[in-house]
Amino acid sequence: MQASPVSDALRRQRSVGHVALSVARMPGGATRITDLSESGPLRLRLPRPEPGSMEAVLLNSAGGIACGDRFAVEARLEASADLVLTTTAAEKIYRSDGPVTRLDVALTLEPDSALAWLPQETILFNGARLARSFSAEMAADARLTLFEALVFGRAAKGEVMRDGRLTDSWRLRRAGRLAYADTLRLDGDIADTLARRAVAGGARAMATLLHLAPDAESRLDQARDLIATAGCDALSVEAGASAWNGMLILRLLGAEIGPLRLAAARILEGFRGRPLPRVWQT
């Protein structure tokens, strides 16, 4: 009897990548790594740090994520630590012939710590199957700025995502209580779903900027001003912001990732008052 394609896929060797790091603020004021473990193709690179803060760059030496691969990132910030986490390039999720790829991120922020999660975009190929989760446990006065961008299909190749599956689950807790929960599920002909006016109006790229901090709600006017000055209309990027319960959230939609990425970069730099990580410029 001939084996099914799914059975063949399940027998393949899959990549399992894991990075876990802990950082702390040193007596001199700089944030430094106190513990780090790496396995599989997932690695961490440490550019020259800025005074007081620390930048870490996630690297996938496999060059992409194939069907059935499993990747996990854990980060713990001790009291008053200041960390920026980013990626070397856009992450590619390849077509799957059955198995689901998993990406799991778990964050822990102790009192007065600040984390900026600023990866470059994730590109889903036609036929990709991805289950992704973000979880965070935050102290009441910790600050988390979380940015994620998704691209559906490779525009440069004229690819349209006619088949695929995405489950994107966010669960963020502050002072032990659930502060933010969001789950996005897309299945089947994703391009057709995104074409619906009530969903994405035909957009093929989307991004979320979520900021949790004691002063988050007071920065809503600033966020809306940044949307106005980022040139979203000229870039054909739709964007909006809202704030509630100590959170600020921005959503962006675009037909292509290039203009959306440019608008997001302008907004992020203005909002954080710092340049984006250098890898964003390469």
Image (tube, rainbow, N blue to C red):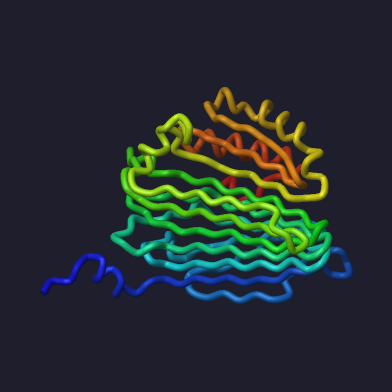
Question: Residue 266 occupies which quadrant of the picture?
Answer: top right
In this rendering, the answer to whether 267 lies above or below 141 is above
Q: Quadrant of the N terminus?
A: bottom left
Q: Residue at x 70, y 59 (%)?
A: 173
282 or 152, which lies in front? 152
Q: Residue at x 52, y 40 (%)?
A: 206
Where's residue 216, x and y in %? Answer: 77, 44
Q: Please, which residue is most extreme toward the left here?
A: 1
Where's residue 45, x and y in %? Answer: 61, 65
Q: Please, which residue is most extreme toward the top here?
A: 234
In this rendering, the answer to whether 47 lies above or below 260 is below
Q: Residue at x 77, y 47 (%)?
A: 246
Q: Please, which residue is most extreme toward the front here?
A: 177
Where's residue 209, x and y in %? Answer: 64, 44
256 or 50, which lies in front? 256
Number of numbered labels in the structure image: 0
Where's residue 259, x and y in %? Answer: 53, 33
62 or 19, which lies in front? 19
Q: Residue at x 62, y 48 (%)?
A: 147
In this rendering, the answer to whether 104 lies above or below 189 is below
